Amino acid sequence: MSSSPPSFPSSFRERFSSTKRLAAIIVYPRECTGIVLKALRGMLFAQRGVRSVVNINLPQGLLEGKTTTTDSSECTGEKMEKVKEARLFLLDPVMFPVSQWQSLPFSSSGEVLPELFSLPLSPEENKAERLTLPRNLLDRLNSAASECDGAQRLYVGTTTYDMTLSYANYTMPEILSTIFSSTPVDSPSSEGTLANSSVAHPAGEKAKEELTALSGFEQVGHIAHVNLSKAHAGFKFIIGQVILDCNPTVTVVVNKLDAISSVYREFAMEVIAVRDNASTNLSPTPSSSMVNSVSESAEELNKLLTATVRQHGCVFRVPYNRVYWNSRLSHEHTRLVNSFHPGEILYDVMAGVGPFAIPAARNGVVVYANDLNPAASEFMKINAKLNHIKEFAKDDEKDSTAGIRIFNMDGREFLKSVVYRSVMPAKDQLSHPDGAHGTCSISPPRRRHVVMNLPALAVEFLDVFSLTNVESPWSQRPKDGTTDSADWNLTIHVYCFSSAPDVLTDAVQQVEHHLGFSLPEENKKSVLMVRDVAPSKRMVCVSFTLPSFFSQSRTATVAPLSLQPNTNAKDVNVVEQEGENLSKIRKLES
C-alpha cells in the first residue's frame, strides 16, 4: 500500500523560524483603532496566525505635551496607565519596504522614543515635521483623523517592529513552494531561514522544474486525498506531513495511484501520512511503522479509511478505499434530489453508498437502490439506519409510501428486472371480469425516476431499452393487456462525459446512439452541464422520458436514429453556483 517514508531531520520545522523587520506606525489614542484599521485596509501585514495590530504601552515621556485631555503633571496611577495605551499597525513589507523606512525600531522599555505627530498634516507639513510618510499612507491617515471624535486628536509616529515567525505562520502552498524551490523562506538577511539547507529532488533538476506547489486537495471526512504527479512523488511523505500540519481536521492523507479501473469504481491509493493521536498542535514526522502498519492489515486500513460525511442534512459512512465518492458532486446530488416529490419512486441504478438514495428516501420518496459493489450496498444499509430510514422488504413494496430497498446486482439486470417489473405489471395483477381487458388492480401510477450516475459507462446501459436487444424484456412487449396497464410515467436521468465543442448536443447523441433510436423532442426534458472534469472534458446530465411507442405494439413506427448535429440547439448558459460549474437547464429545440 505504501513504501517506507524517509527519515526527516528533526529541525525541519525549526528551519522556517525567522525574524522579520517590518515598517510600522504608532497610533494614539486607542479609541481611534477601528477608524484607522478601516482606512488602512489592504496596506497591513498579512501572515497566517499573525495580528497586524499590536497592543503597546508608550513611554509616558513620549506623550507629554501631545495631549489636551490629560495634563502631564496629573499622569499618575490609573490615569497614567490609560494615557500610555496605544496601537502599533504593522505595514505590508511589499508596499512599504523597511529599507526605505527611515525610523528607529520600537522599544517598549522606552530606550527609543519615536516622535508622535498630530494629524491631519499637509504633504508640506509632513515633510517639515520629519514624519516623511508616503503620500498614499498620509492620505489614508488624514482621512481617518477627520473621522475621529472632535474631542480627540489622532497622533501617529513611524517606527519598525521585529516580528518573529515560525513554521506555524506559513500556509501549505508557502511551505511546499519553499521546499520545492529550495530557497530561503525570507530574504538572505533574515535569521534562521532555510538558506543552505535545500532539499534535493530525488528525480533531479529536470523534475524539480516541473514542480508546482499544491494549493488544495479533496477532503472526505478526516481523509485528505491528493493526486500527485511523478515530479511530486519524491516529496509525497513530506507533502502528506505538511497537509496534516496545516489542516487540523485531517488525520490521514492518501495519494491516488491510478485511474479508476475496477468494476467497483474504487481507485488504488497509498497512505502517505497518518496523524499521531498523541500529538498536540503539530504532528510529528511520520515514522515507517506508523504508515506501514496500516498497509499490512486490511482490517486496520479499512477502519482508518472509513470516513463520516454530512450532506443534504444526512450522515454517510464512506469506506473511501472501497467505493467511489466524489465530494464535488454534492451540489448535483442536492439539485436532483430536490426535484423529487414525496410519494414518487426512485430507481438508483448505480447508487454507491446512497448520496442520491438516502436523502431522497428521507424526503418521502420510495427508493430502490442498487450497486454492483458489495461494499457500497453494505454501507448503504448502514447509512439508511444512521438516517432512520425504513428498509422495506419485497412484500411491502405495493403498500410502501416511503423507505428504501437495497440491491446488490449488475445495473443492466436491475433495469431488466426491478425497474421493468415496476413499470410492467404482472398478469396476476390484472383482472378480466368480462373476458376482455380489464382494469389494473394495482395502485394509481406514480411519477418514477431512474438515476444512472456512472458517467464513464452509464449511457452504455441504455441498450436495455433498445428494440433490437432481444435479451431485454423492454423489447418484448406483450399484447395481452399488460402493456395497456403499464405505468410509463418514467423519467431517466443519465450522466455522461463529453469533450465535444457542443457538449449538450453530443450528450444527447450518446444517449440516442445506445438507445438505438432518436428521441422525439417532447421526450427530451433537460440537458444539464454538471461540472468541468478537465479543461476539455465536461460531465453532463441528460433527462428524458420513454417515447410513446413503448406503450404500443411492436409494429409501431420508430423514429430512425440520426446522429447529425442539432444546429438549432442553444448554446449552454454557464453560471457559477456554490463552487460548481453548473449550467441552467435547457430545453433542446428542433
Image (cartoon, rainbow, N blue to C red):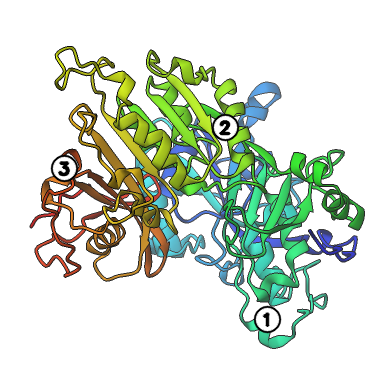
Q: Is residue 46 left or right of residue 563?
A: right
Please provide percent x and percent y for residue 568: 9, 63
Front residue (pair 311, 149): 311
Q: Amino acid at mark 1?
A: Lys
Viewer-nearest of discs 2 and 3: 3
Q: Amino acid at mark 3?
A: Ser
Instruction: Give the CA distance from mark 3 to mark 1.
Output: 67 Å
Q: Is residue 417 above or below residue 247?
A: above
Q: Label 2: which residue?
A: 380
Sequence-wise, which precedes: disc 2 or disc 3?
2
Sequence-wise, which precedes: disc 3 or disc 1?
1
Instruction: Give the CA distance from mark 2 to mark 3.
Output: 39 Å
Q: Label 1: which residue?
A: 208
Q: Label 3: which residue?
A: 553
Q: Amino acid at mark 2?
A: Met
* Res 412 seen here: yes
Q: Quadrant of residue 362?
A: top left
| Residue found at x 79% / y 49% | 274
Q: Quadrant of the C terminus?
A: bottom left
Category of crowding for the residue at label 1, using alpha-carbon neighbours closer than 10 angstroms: few (below 14), some (14–19), many (at least 20): some
Please provide percent x and percent y for residue 404: 47, 24
The kind of secondary structure element at disc 3 is: loop
